[in-house]
Image: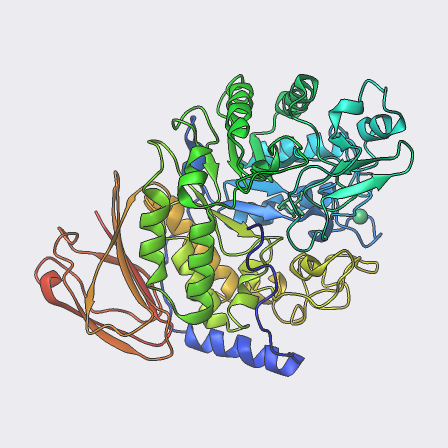
């Protein structure tokens, strides 16, 4: 199961007027949200475990900021916006693939692993971005696409040129298709493409323009580890590893057994150990891997907790978050946390997110209801794991409507910096139409409004940095007497303190009774809330009465 929820959620056609109405409603709903008046807290996490404490920001380079008017975002555009990223309280960025590419899979078809796509700039631009980021204390993850190359990669050009070429065996060739794996949507129906030059077929888990590298060949293994070293030597802080689960499959056979393995092959875990060894050659590097599997399989990718990936994403958590945002199924979350964390080795932590370039925007999931998207954010930043914010979510960016490569372009629209035709993204013509609503939901229009979506994100991330317990602390669900569907209450317990979080993912106001005595050992501080809650202290914590309005929330901290 690759993209189980790839299709964008049902979305209503929106006009500018309904967009304005929606945003007005969120501003009114949260006009009373006072929250912390403290200065925003910057991240300051060092040492080998830094990645467990920070909030990451995930950037689609083609759509972030265009600095030369060609309508295409570029690396200097990211550099120019580092101060903005820093103003969010972010501790690390993950940049989508920026390598030369014919763009059949939006850059996930890499034509050269050690160069920069001229659309996005040069290696010097990358070095400058990295230096400027580091100067601001921001870590940088790049996207490492190891399973496959582009058909335009020099290795594949050689490989396909003749059956005797030294690179022939760097890819998976067969006279007759003999691996029964099939791509998942939207990558087509067959994993084999006929190549007339030599009259054989090559294997691809994804689009035909993305031939799989043959990892059974030791030269391929070495060559790709050298690619990692190339970027680590330049100073990157680590990688987001793409589609790792597809790197090995059972060997080709004309008579495949019913349990033929296409994903999560045992051999992949051996190679992951080699990847980790390379990362460990450098101080304080980290990794997050894209794995879409059940919790036990996912946990295997952490190895023993120090010889696998530092983090992976979690399908179980992602589905629970999406279910919660879409259908008030808040009760999914504690179960998903329990199930996904049970098989983890010591020291392991997930990366968590509401949106990304494959799954779609949280605003789409929330049926374009900003109250739901807001509550989803309050949830994300207060749950265990390292939060990854997909660029634009912080201003309430909606899914787009324009499509060039495939349906996922709807999730990759230009970052709305201002109103106007190029939404501040470009002075030229944007390569992809901005999402509906970008005229009103943008950085400029939200910047100075203390109650805006953008500034709520800032407060949440600042609180994440200040309390420093949400990433790593334990999670305990709290039962609420009198609760209806959609109510979620939990405690987070860390080394530096505790937090209690109450969320109401429903249209109805809910009045509940909570026993918080286990956590409220001193007066609790209400850090962020939709409506000021009654005082919470050891005297009333045993039977604390709380009324949460529709989509209301409170986060308390306890020393
Ligand atoms: C990953 C990427 C996705 C890409 C695929 C093939 O799933 O997130 O965008 O299409 O790998 O590289
Ligand atoms: Ca440009």
Pick whichever, 242 or 236, lies toward us. Answer: 242
Relative image position of residue 553 (x, y in whole percent) = 33, 66
Residue at the outermost right position: 197
- Residue at x-position 92% and y-position 33%: 197
Is 12 positioned to the left or the right of 106 in the image? left
Residue 210 higher or lower than 127, as above or below: below
Pick whichever, 559 or 314, lies toward us. Answer: 314
Relative image position of residue 401 (x, y in whole percent) = 71, 68
Is 557 positioned to the left or the right of 251 in the image? left
Residue at the outermost left position: 539
Residue 3 higher or lower than 324, as above or below: above
Relative image position of residue 67 (x, y in whole percent) = 78, 48
Relative image position of residue 484 (x, y in whole percent) = 27, 74
Determine which quarter of the picture holds residue 371.
bottom left
Is 185 positioned to the left or the right of 273 in the image? right
Q: Is residue 451 visible?
A: no
Residue 290 higher or lower than 36, as above or below: above
- Residue at x-position 58% and y-position 73%: 10
Pick whichever, 213 or 227, lies toward us. Answer: 213
- Residue at x-position 66% and y-position 34%: 147
Is 248 positioned to the left or the right of 485 in the image? right
- The coloring applied to the image is rainbow
- Residue at x-position 76% and y-position 51%: 66
Q: Is residue 355 visible?
A: yes
Counting every numbered tag in the picture gives: 0
Residue at the outermost front position: 255
């Amino acid at each position: 199961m690759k993209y189980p929820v790839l299709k964008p959620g049902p979305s209503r056609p929106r006009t500018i007027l309904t967009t304005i109405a929606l945003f007005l409603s969120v501003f009114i709903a949260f006009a009373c949200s006072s929250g912390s008046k403290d200065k925003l807290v910057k991240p300051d996490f060092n040492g080998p475990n830094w990645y467990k404490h920070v909030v990451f920001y995930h950037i689609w380079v083609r759509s972030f900021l265009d600095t030369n008017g060609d309508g295409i975002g570029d690396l200097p555009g990211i550099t120019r916006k580092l101060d903005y990223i820093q103003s969010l309280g972010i501790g690390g960025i993950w940049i989508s693939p920026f390598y030369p590419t014919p763009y059949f899979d939006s850059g996930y078809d890499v034509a050269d692993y050690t160069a920069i796509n001229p659309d996005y700039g040069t290696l010097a631009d990358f070095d400058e971005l990295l230096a400027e980021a580091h100067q601001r204390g921001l870590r940088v993850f790049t996207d490492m696409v190891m399973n496959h190359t582009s058909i335009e990669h020099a290795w594949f050009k050689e490989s396909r040129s003749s059956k005797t070429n030294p690179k022939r065996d760097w890819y998976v060739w067969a006279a007759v298709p003999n691996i029964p794996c099939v791509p998942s949507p939207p990558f087509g129906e067959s994993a084999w493409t006929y190549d007339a030059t030599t009259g054989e077929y090559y294997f691809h888990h994804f689009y035909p323009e993305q031939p799989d590298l043959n990892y059974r060949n030791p030269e391929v293994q070495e060559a790709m580890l050298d690619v990692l070293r190339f970027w680590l030597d330049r100073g990157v802080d680590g990688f987001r590893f793409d589609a790792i689960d597809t790197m090995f499959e059972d060997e080709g056979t004309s008579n495949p057994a019913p349990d033929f393995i296409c994903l999560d092959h045992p051999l992949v875990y051996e190679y992951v150990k080699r990847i980790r060894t390379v990362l460990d050659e450098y101080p304080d590097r980290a990794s997050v891997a894209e794995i879409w599997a059940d919790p036990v399989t996912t946990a295997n990718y952490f190895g023993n907790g120090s010889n696998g990936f530092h983090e992976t994403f979690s399908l179980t958590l992602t589905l629970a978050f999406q279910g919660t945002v879409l259908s008030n199924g808040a009760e999914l979350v504690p179960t998903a946390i329990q199930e996904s964390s049970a098989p983890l080795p010591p020291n392991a932590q997930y990366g968590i997110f509401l949106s990304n370039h494959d799954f779609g925007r949280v605003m789409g999931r929330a049926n374009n209801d900003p109250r739901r998207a807001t509550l989803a954010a309050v949830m994300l930043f207060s749950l265990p794991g390292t939060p990854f914010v997909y660029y634009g979510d912080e201003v309430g960016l909606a899914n787009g409507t324009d499509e060039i490569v495939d349906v996922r372009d709807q999730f990759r629209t230009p970052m709305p910096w201002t109103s106007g035709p190029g939404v501040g993204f470009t002075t030229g013509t944007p390569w992809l139409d901005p999402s509906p609503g970008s005229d009103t939901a943008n950085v400029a229009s939200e910047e100075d409004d203390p109650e805006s979506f953008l500034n709520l994100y800032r407060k949440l991330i600042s609180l994440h940095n200040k309390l420093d317990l949400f990433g790593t602390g334990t999670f305990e669900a709290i039962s609420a007497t009198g609760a209806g569907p959609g109510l979620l209450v939990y405690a987070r317990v860390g080394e530096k303190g505790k937090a209690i979080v109450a969320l109401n993912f429903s249209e109805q106001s809910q009045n509940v009774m909570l026993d918080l005595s286990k956590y409220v050992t001193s007066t609790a501080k209400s850090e962020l809330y939709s409506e000021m809650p009654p005082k919470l202290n050891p005297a009333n914590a045993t039977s604390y009465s709380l009324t949460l309005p529709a989509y209301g929330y409170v986060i308390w901290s306890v020393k």
